[in-house]
Amino acid sequence: MAYTKTVWNDRIKNSAGDIIQEGTPVSAGNMNKIEKGIEDAHKQMEQAAKETVSLPYGPSVLNSPNGSPLDVQIEGRTLISMGNSDLEGGKKYVLADPKTAVVIDGTTYKGISKFEGKNARPTIIRTANFEGKVAGSTLENPHISKRTTFNDTPITLLKPSDFTIEVNGTDGGYSTLNSLNGTLSSITMNKPYIVNGISQELFSFNLIEEVERKVGRIPGSTVTDKIIWLKNNLNKLTFNWYGFGAGVGGNKATVKFFRVSNSSWEATTGGTNSHTSSVVSKISQIITGVANYIDDNGFIHFLAHAEASDGTIASTINTDYADLDIELKSNADFYAPRVPLYEVPQESYDKILVEWDAAAVVTRYSMVEGIKSFQNPIVTIEGDNLLPPFSEWNLHANAKVKSPYELELNSSANDQYSSYILDAFPNTEYNLRCETDVPSSRILVYEIDASGNYLNTGGARDKKFTTISNTRKLMVRVTNTGGFIGQTNFKNPILSLSSADKPFSPRNPSRLYAETTLRGLNNVNDVLYQNDGNWKVLKKWEEVLLDGSNPWAWHADFVGYKAIKVADAFGSITTSTNTSIYQVTNHLGALLKKLTTSSDLDLNSAAAWFGNITGNAGVADVILTVPDILTGWSDSYTPTSDEIKAYFNGWKVKIVDGSNKPTAWVSVLDGTDAPTQTLDYVKANKAPNYTGYRLLYQLARPRVVDITDKVEGSLSASGQVQVSIDSGVVVREKAIPKVSTDGLYCCINSFNNPYYVGSVPLKNKVSKFLFVYKNNKIDNVWEFFEDGKGYGKQRANISSNDFDPAAEYYVTYLVWDKETFTNNPVNVKASYNTSIRSTVDQMNEQLADVKSMASIHDRYLYKLLLAAKANGWSV
């Protein structure tokens, strides 16, 4: 507990001898308080003490009483999507997506749920809606809604291509459509009302994007190929609309779908197509034969409309919410599954929806593509100021940054604000301040819940405040208010996680990045930790790609399938009848069934299943079974090693000669011909988009790997601080800046932008840039834009005058589509000192480590110089 000092007062008398101020008594209580303070200070100085806490994924609060380095230990984990795998009876599974349902042997599990498996493959039902949609962008959400105009309401139902205006803030925008919450998107027309005018709203769903982003990749290299797949693999579509209409004759709303084959709006015979309620009610349209309704871009369109106006009474359509249930057939052959359906051990199964609520389940079992392990962790500790420089804010068009923490607003109307959104905590004290030269101008704060709903209307918060119980984010605004129009300057905004006033300081977080992959299954996990100043990984798992580079050989032949193997190719693999210690996914990303002995192979003639791993002189054989219908090999044909390599590069036999020997090949994914029809080509080159079989196995003996050269940064904490745990950081990737066609600007990560012809985007889509480096130093002149012109969410821009073509540029950033890169961390331990002695001891240890490392580097440098001189180089 912090020590509170006692203010000691003298006893004071006046000239008459009367006491006018009592002195502080020298009592046992006061003296014992002094003794207690001395004792606590002594402990802080003399006793070594540490505390270890578990940090969750995302932001959290940590309270370190003394300024202290923060040590972290991070465990790995691996998730394998079961979206296109055969489940097994008796095993435990979790579905962790509120917008996905799976049907297992006639039983439907929807949203966040857990269940015991049956020997069946799941049927996937995906719900598409407008959650997270940003107008004018398809990055966050690929679907779109459009409306008729206020003054040009048509007298007929428009075709999808005739709509030109996307829903916007005037009619409520996407924020009114993303949930069923009573907030309406209302479309009507202004007076005078147009005779026979029909108010209508279009809802267009991109089926290709929804399936590929949330279910799995569709085989095929073109949009046409993917549309053909949709027509063959969709079972039914159900459009659900919630709202009501108003017009002549009272309340009526009608929903129809667009039939592409004859370019007309229709209503289904199943479900409902209209209602006459005056309050929000549901209409459903069900389509079972989808082939005639998917357009050439992979969209399907629905329309909600009211009755026509008679010139006196308006036609109005009100929408609260709309979504589309996309049900695939049970045998839909997509690959690289993304459905967050996972096998879990009994210990975790018991905690799901008991100890872990729905939100925690979604965090722990995030969506991944195929098989993904935890990769590239990032730990961030904020300083006293949670607000970044104004250059990182969403600026109003009339605002300009004068210096990192100084903004000039030349307003032309009231409330022209610039804003910044950050993570926040419920029931927590904050302190917000900002300097301004116009008294009526303000810094305001809005509290936001997990669904994006605003919890208050904002207010001047030049003071401390406590957040509401369901606050999850804050939007901070600087704006002109009170009707003032003109120039306003804002300077030194500070938001601190404290009730105490703190002097202004720039945002200065400490960060730790690690470029490493940490795997783990069934509570056996790789561990990242620091020892003697070096970063190490205790590796317990290994993962390899089973492709054409492996020494494949034929093993055995069965009716309809073959067993093949890689002999003595892998390091020390734990061999056991416990099949959880190794996992294999096939070229589609489906998890293969694990057999414990090779004698089981002849019992499973119908499936391409994982055979077994057998120990052999410290290394291992991997035996797989593959069906002849998938490989293209004839039933009695014994393939050569090179022909097996061709299959594991993604090629299926197309043509054989008279001896059943393969002579031509096509892709196993989409049936396209190999560009060069020779065995030499297919055994050495992968088919387009082919990902291949993967083997994840537990090492017989864990090993320690030093990765100090792949870790950057350090962590420290003082007092109450905000800590954020995440993954998917890319550190110092080399960038290729591109100068604009007019020569005025230079950009990093531009994508499909004619202003930067020939621009090379980064390796991954960018969610957020952290730093741009010029050679080895941070280059702070770059600005980051979210305007839909970058690869991912952001691009970086500078004036060409600030660009040095002779320099090397590097970037550190967070990946946008994390499901293709990593999963979420769930087990991070942080240790910090709780006494002054512990802090001093640790700093001395770290100084000794630095000196030791420096001496090692000096020795290597000396040897390098000697070698250089020996080779005739002068220094």
Image: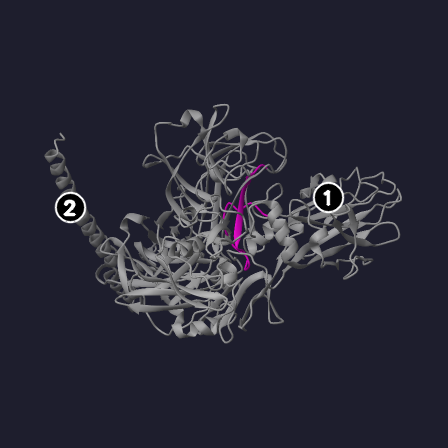
**Residue type, label 2:** Ser
Say what secondary structure mark 1 lies in.
helix
Report the span colored magenta: 456-480
Question: Measured along the vertical axis of the image, is residue 187 above or below residue 325?
Answer: above
Q: Is residue 459 magenta?
A: yes
Residue that label 1 marks:
160
| Mark closer to the chain start, 1 or 2 | 1
Residue that label 2 marks:
855
The residue positioned 64% from the left and 56% from the top of the image is: 232
47 sits to left or right of 676: left
Give the camera-side residue of 759 and 263.
263
834 sits to left or right of 583: left
Say what secondary structure mark 2 lies in.
helix
The answer to whether any part of residue 456 appears in the image is: no
Give the camera-side residue of 549 and 462.
549
The residue positioned 45% from the left and 65% from the top of the image is: 562
Q: Is residue 324 magenta?
A: no
Give the camera-side residue of 493 and 33.
493
Question: Measured along the vertical axis of the image, is residue 690 above or below residue 346?
Answer: above
Q: Residues within 10 Å of mark 2 (few under 14, many from 20)?
A: few
Q: Residue extending furthest bottom?
A: 90
The residue positioned 27% from the left and 61% from the top of the image is: 703
